Image: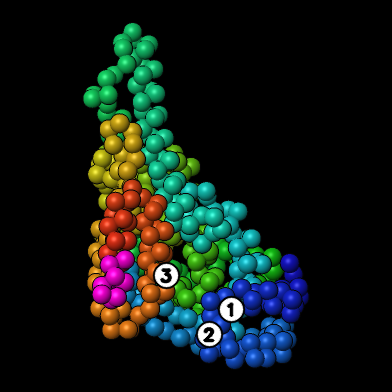
Amino acid sequence: MNYEEFTSVPVLDVAYRKTRRGKRGKRAEAIFESRETAKLIALSEYLRSGHYEPAPLDAFMIYEPKARTINAPAFRDKIVQRALTDEVVYPALAPSVPYNAFAAQTGKGQHHGLDMMEHHMRTYFLRRKAADEAARKAAGLPYRPMQEWDYADGWVIKGDVRKCFPSTDHDMLKAAVYPRLPGPEFCELLGKYIDQVDGLALGHQTSHICAVYYLSKALHYINQDLGCPMSGMYMDDWYVIVETKEEARRVLEAAREKFKSLGYDLNNKTGIFPLRNGIDFCGFHVYLTQSGRVIRKLRQSSKKKMKRRIKKWERDYKAGLITREKIEESFQAWNAHAAHGDTRKLRQQLREKVDNIYKEAKA
């Protein structure tokens, strides 16, 4: 797609209709929608004029899962970013992102990352088991009894980038991304969003796919140059499974240097742990048992938050401050996430607590 096609009203209209989903009750969207055709024509002409500049960002704080600053663009700029991401940046960058890098990609979200990590753990176990059985068969020995299996023994490097978005270097990111874009106009437009804040703005749609693509250079290095394919990355959170602690130390040191070459440091949560301790990833703590079974346990923080939320719902529902529909919407979202783990009993218990809110209110 060339820049003339990109800035056409039909392309911007598709982006506008995607952008307004879930926002039609908000003031900015309502103002735009009241004269949408005229505003889309004006936006098209503004982009083609060569004088387009994004509006100032609206900064605010969020505190879950941790305190972060969100820099939200104006509704008009969200439309442009949606079109730029969907039509240009994503098609240019996504094909070069390795399969075991998750987030900001169609069909490769948090739960896909969880499934892939389980696959890696099972593969690690079965390869060790197959190699041991082949060696014992060649030596004329019987299969090892299950109580003596040590195939789940191994080591995990668990890494996390320190302040990934705020510490992203603009020049280095542009040098990696710009050559893949189809024209200088797109580079200039993307650069306007990159340069709006130090690092990358968390509220920009363009930031996420650019960050995933740039960080995946480290994952390519781990997979191919270091020969560790049983690895994965969700945004700046990554893991590698290896057999020995010595290998884990070597890989971590090499990976640390690779991240440094990209302008990043690893934070103090980065470390080396026995595989039997499990891996904390994508909202779950996942364990590989001696028999080769993989168990997914929900993070304790997620359990505690939902229990606190249910107590608050109980108070607010009695006071008429929240509706049953809002409670169900929030609980079902949590329940759908928790269902990706071994949580049937927990979900039943909390479902009963939620149902009791309605029963007690009627009593």
Q: Amino acid at mark 3?
A: Glu
For the point 71% across and 74% down, the residue is: 11
**Pointer 3 residue:** 329
For the point 52% across and 48% down, the residue is: 99
Earlier along the polypeptide chain: callout 2 or callout 3? 2
Inter-mark Cα distance, 2 to 3? 18 Å
Above or below, comparing residue 199 to residue 28 in the picture: above
Q: Which residues are magenta?
A: 355-363
**Where the C terminus falls, by quadrant?**
bottom left
Numbered mark located on residue 20 in the image = 1
For the point 28% across and 41% down, the residue is: 275
Q: How is the image coloured?
A: rainbow
Q: Nearer the viewer, mark 1 or mark 2?
A: 2
* 63 displayed left or right of 106: left
Earlier along the polypeptide chain: callout 1 or callout 2? 1
Q: Position of residue 143 (x, y in %)?
A: 32, 16
